[in-house]
Amino acid sequence: MPFDRPASPIGSRRNPEGGVAPAVLPARTAVAVIGGGLIGLSIAWRLARAGRTVTVLERETIGAGASLAATGMLAPAAEHEPGSDPLLPLALDSLRLWPGFRDALEAESGRTIDYRADGTLVLAVGRDEVERLRFRYDLQRRSGLDATWLPGSEVRRLEPGLRPSVTAGIHCPLDHQVDPRLVMEALTEACRRAGVILVERTAVTTLDWSGGRVTGIRADDRVVAAETVILASGAWSGEGGLLPDALALPVRPLKGQSLALRTTARTGTLARMVWTEQVHMAPKSDGQLIVGATVEDCGFRPGVTAGGLYALLEGARRVLPGIEEMEVEAVWSGYRPTSDDDAPILDTIAPGLVAATGHHRNGYLLAPITAEAIAALVLHGALPEVARPFTRLRFGQPDALRASA
């Protein structure tokens, strides 16, 4: 299982309400999407709206990879760090697409997604952290991002519940957030209404090839013919067995553990996302405060650990004393799909086979631009200019056409 459900009264936040009705694999579809997470469903919905017949195959349940384990941050400014300049134009373009993506998704699903435009505060405690935060701020400003340096007193004016030891902060007003559970519920419903066939607990075991081209997939001992197959299986995209060695993708899982706290009028909460060097905290409109996330390069090792939860709670308590009175409602772990340079892979990797994976911790931020880019690739044969730096060629891998010859 991609997530561990602890055998305790503490549950998991990952399951959306309802489920996907059982679906029968069709014999033929225009587009077969491997992976029923945020990226796979966003692409499926976009292509279905363009008139393509689409089938999504998910090895577990919808959203059971990283999508329901995420915090839902749309934070290009807070996420910006040394080495991420090449990703910034894609991230900013996607953020600009998000309001339209939200409006269409809510209208076509009949559901809200708790889109919050509250911004992010990135905090420092003590001299060493202030120096590192100043370096981050200078980088943001050089990159043209909207960010404001705040002294500790101004940070605490914005967030009165923070400790007096908070020394300084950066306010990133254009960073936004969504609730992953609500987004996945809305995407599932929007896909259904658009005619997408959603098939759960069905692992794709083999790609069908003919004349050097992918012509479909095999799953449950059945063949589904497809004009285009889209590999959007997140952290599992780099697993062996499905792709030939020449087309293997440099994607691996980075495990993260997170928890949800229940806030009350007595405990107080935060007004916006707050980041420290140890944790990030995201208040949701349902009264939960999400604290995440550890970074563990340990492969697909399941489970929630005492050490991981301690690190999250201590990191949050260091700046927000009110968490001591908050009830722990849920704990969970998941796997970020991480490429060798922490940026997505958007590419035709062989005739008839497209990859959309490797989004690292920016899946929610990059979902709209990924859907648009892959739709352009499938419908018109070319990526938009902003997405062209993110093909597999940047890793020195062979051209798709040559590799499949």
Image: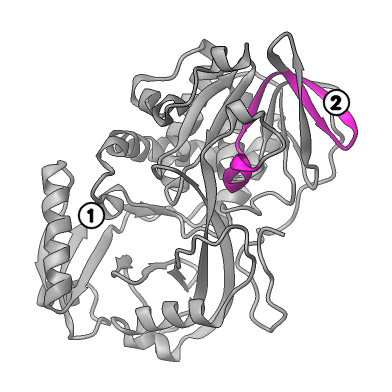
- Which-is-in-front pick, marks 1 and 2? 2
Magenta stretch in the rendered image: 215-239
Check disc 2 and give the amino acid type. Val
Which residue is located at x 85 percent, y 44 percent?
A: 22
Compared across the picture, whether 5 is left or right of 77 comes to right
Front residue of 389/25: it is 389
Residue shown at the point (51%, 73%) measured from the top left: 259
- Magenta-colored segment: predominant secondary structure: strand
Q: How many marks?
A: 2
Q: CA distance from mark 1 to mark 2?
A: 49 Å
Specify whether residue 110 is in view. no
Answer with the quarter of the image where residue 131 lies.
bottom left
Residue 229 lies in the magenta-colored region: yes
How is this picture coloured? one colour
Three-letter amino acid code of the residue under disc 1: Pro
Label 2: which residue?
223
Residue 260 percent across, percent down from the top left? 51, 74
Is residue 114 a member of the stretch shown in magenta? no
Residue at the (42%, 35%) spot, across then down: 100
Camera-nearest residue between 6 and 29? 6
Q: Tell me the element at label 1.
A: loop
Res. 173 mark: 1
- Dot 2 falls on a residue whose secondary structure is strand
Whether the residues at callouts 1 and 2 have beta carbons within 8 Å, the answer is no
User: Most extreme residue toward the right, as rendered?
Assistant: 221
Look at 68% across and 76% down and name the residue there. Answer: 6
Bin the neighbour count of mark 1 within 10 Å (Cα to Cα): few under 14, some 14-19, many 20 and up.
some
Q: Which badge, 1 or 2, is on the more N-terminal residue? A: 1
Closer to the camera in the image, 372 or 35: 35
- Asked if residue 50 lies left or right of residue 103, the reply is right
- For this orientation, the residue located farthest to the top is 211
